[in-house]
Image (cartoon, grey):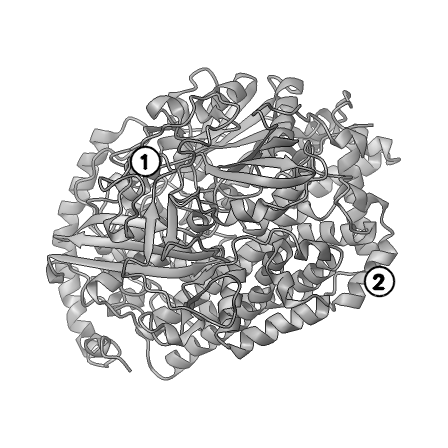
Amino acid sequence: MGTQQKSKRETYFESIISHGYNRRDFMKFASFITAYMGLEHSMIGQVAKSLEASYRLPIIWEHYQECTCCSESFIRSDHPIVSDIILDNVSLDYTETLMAASGHQAEAAKHDTMKKYYGEYILCVEGSVPMGADGVYCTIAGKTALQHLKDAAEGAKLIIAWGSCATNGCVQGAKPNPTNATPIHKIIKNKPIVKMPGCPPIGEAMAALIVHYVTFGRLPELDRSGRPKAFYGKRVHDTCYRRPYFDAGLFAETFDDENAKEGYCLYKVGCKGPTTYNACGSMKWNNGVSFPIQSGHGCIGCSEANFWDNGPFYERLTNIPGFSIEGNADKVGKVAAGAVAAGLTAHAIAANVSKYKELKGRYTKGKLDYKNLDKKK
Amino acid sequence: MAERIVVDPVTRIEGHLRIEAEIKDGKIVDAYSSSTMVRGLENIVKGRDPRDVWAFAQRTCGVCTTVHAIASVRSVEDALGIVIPPNAEMVRNIMAGTLYMHDHCVHFYHLHALDWVDVVNALKADPAETSRIAQSISKWPKSSPGYFSDIQNRIKKFVESGQLGIFANGYWGHPQMKLPAEINLLGVAHYLEALEWQKEIVKIHTILGGKNPHPNYLVGGMACAINEESMGGLNAERLAHVGKLLKQGRDFINQVYIPDLLAIASFYKDWGAIGKGIGNYMSYGDFPTNGYSDPSNFKFPQGVILNRDLSKVYDVDHRNEDIEEFVNNSWYDNYTEGADTGRHPWDGETNIKYSGPKPPYEHLDISQKYSFIKTPRWKGNAMEVGPLARLLVGYARGNKEIQNAVNGALTHLDVPVEALFSTLGRTAARGIETQLVADWTMEFYNQLLTNIKNGDARMANMELWEPSKWPAEAKGVGFTEAPRGGLAHWIRIKDGKTENYQQVVPTTWNASPRDPKGQLSAYESALIGTPVADPELPLEIIRTIHSFDPCLACAVHLYDEHGKHISRVTNISSCIV
């Protein structure tokens, strides 16, 4: 009674019925799931329909040139939690990070899914593909990452490009890009590709993309560059709780100064929030606990293409080459960033001069005694 | 007659690794370890602002997502003579300690446990008996018969769906799986609980570093300014959140991880004689309590042990030629001094030059260069790094806290001290040190609170922030103990830019190819002598490799003595489900 021999694909509904439950139990379950997912009561019918019609969605999750931070972020998801996703929502048939099997057994599991669910499985890609030197900079099971990608993409229904590696080449694609690290969309042209940039993307956003697809049977709305609008539709700057300080011209001048301690805007210490599209300001990280700016460090723009080469990270935004708003917005972006910077400087100087006067007394309180730090105790 | 076997890829690790092993009379007689992925990060950071490099270096690994940032900021601070405020030292320690707690638990349950726990066999367990066992070894509250029964039903339903997902083609029913069904069920239940728990403990990184994975660091200290009177900084609410999470983390470790580790280990004591390895152990030491420059105040002592001789501990110096890297068997251009010479990392170079077989390939040519990993040596010796090395160095240094923890575990398992030099020893050491680190991290947290109470709110030393204040040339080393072992970054700074950058990571020490003298590194050495019951299902190889907690993706390849592939296994779940 091997699992691989089992040809019939049982749907949720069939599975429940075969376990002695009736239709009423099934509808209760559907209501529960609907409520659990925080959806409107009116959605129960749709959820039930999707559960009736589907077996668990097979997923093949490939790893190429990456650091596994995307997988790590995925397992940090709080809602739904990842054990519910992999036990109840999808069938994660191949992932080097979590799967029990190794070696030939692992590759066999992947090929079983590629064959059995041809045209139906989702291919998730974590990592870029090195195109230099005929692909020898990343081989798995003796095959290049490029070959693995092409093989797995062929029967995929759609592709999810996790993180900045798969969507823009990320750190290994930074200058001089020694291995010619290449994002997925530049290799696979004939499949829908959803891009979830970020280093890594937010765990709950990753889980939500999968749950959205499983629940509604379709992808969330994407922007022109293929990113879900729900997570990449706004700049970090526009959802940042420190935005009022920006508007008021109140800035941290350096880290740990009196202004930084007050939680003022981090623009002057290099925050890339004004040019970065991500949900960090609204969803925050790790179930809403915090996000980089709230914890005192500027945004480094990790969900924008070429962000590694748009630095230095601690230099304020003035002249950014090619940040990507909705794909082809290089020129617009350049002008916008320039205008922001010019207007800001004048505004900021005036506002901060008066603030300095106000704060002058506090600077003498003696809590910032760096002078004696180097002296050993 | 010897045969060679191949497992490719080895899963449940970070990165891409390949191992070829030769088997004779059911035992491994030779092994080769190879990493098959390269990105060239050391070259990418050249010419960049040294204050930015931590972020690049951090992306070396998203699993031990903090240690490369720590090594990097330390290297720059070391080069420029920056001393960070005590609060920043404590915050870094808390974040590193959090990583140990997270990483070791995730390794045990999600990367290593499936080598020892038979998920499918758990379906045969009596949940009431599992409950009785659970309550006899721990006071962890989720232990009722109903709880384990629910878990069992959930797994049953999952298996019956015919879609085994991550559990497909696992080593279920393998003759080396020796746990009773009830313990298997306990393991599966806690696999799922640990998966849920791990996303909580990392919130400490989120509070202090803004996100996890890849929290933010800062040259000169940390960016999370302290201000107990404002919602803009670390205030009482934020700090209390950290404290709560630390306490929860420690409870999980003491009440779930450690009892499970001891219960499972007691069925695999024979693995206390397997996977011995080279017998040389090195710890850089870490968790400073009075500054990075004085290793004598570190919680983990620094030192080297040779040939399992615990009576003598040698000192480690990162700044002289004691540490050298070789590329004689690595896919890089040979150094100009010759193929068999080593270089200290300050003078190291990374000129990638692949010379392995053209893909697709069945096996590597092990008579030639065979890995993207370089080969580091300490005074010419191969070294094992990791939890076992840390504990042995601490033990040999006479550290009472470490000695008591190690002796306690040995007594509990009723095994001699020699059992530490093994696959089981590495896995046990990881658990033992997690308990220690969980306690220390609470100490760091309390120290941070005390500092703030006493009026010290400094979190970053920005005096030397501006490159205009730096010397024209400087060099530094930043070392730390990553969960997987000693890690160091070497930097040369020239005219405010990164002139050269070299990372020697734990897996470089453990997984490297042979050196010019033909000496084996830790993985290759530890595999020799390992029994392999069924070359088609080389579970034993996976166990020993996983005991090191590899940080690269890995592939183990099995051949016969003429390099001929043995037949492939396509479906093993069919025989046991």
**Residue at mark 1:** B332
Which quarter shows the C terminus of chain B? Answer: top right
Judge whether residue B363 can be spotted in this image. yes
Task: Give left or right: position of A331 versus A94.
Answer: left
Check disc 1 and report its element: helix, strand or loop: loop
Check disc 2 and report its element: helix, strand or loop: helix
Gap between marks 2 and 1 measured at Cα: 57 Å
Foreground mark, 2 or 1, reads 1
Chain to which the residue tagged by mark 2 belongs = B
Task: Give left or right: position of B100 versus A44.
Answer: left
Name the N-terminal-most of marks 2 and 1.
2
Residue shown at the point (36%, 33%) measured from the top left: A169
Where residue B379 sits in the image (x, y, percent)? 36, 57
Residue shown at the point (58%, 29%) measured from the top left: A60
Amino acid identity at mark 2: Arg
Residue shown at the point (44%, 31%) measured from the top left: B367
Residue B405, by quadrant, is bottom right
Task: Specify the label residue B406 is tagged with.
Answer: none
Where residue A352 sits in the image (x, y, percent)? 17, 63
Amino acid identity at mark 1: Tyr
Residue B102, by quadrant, is bottom right
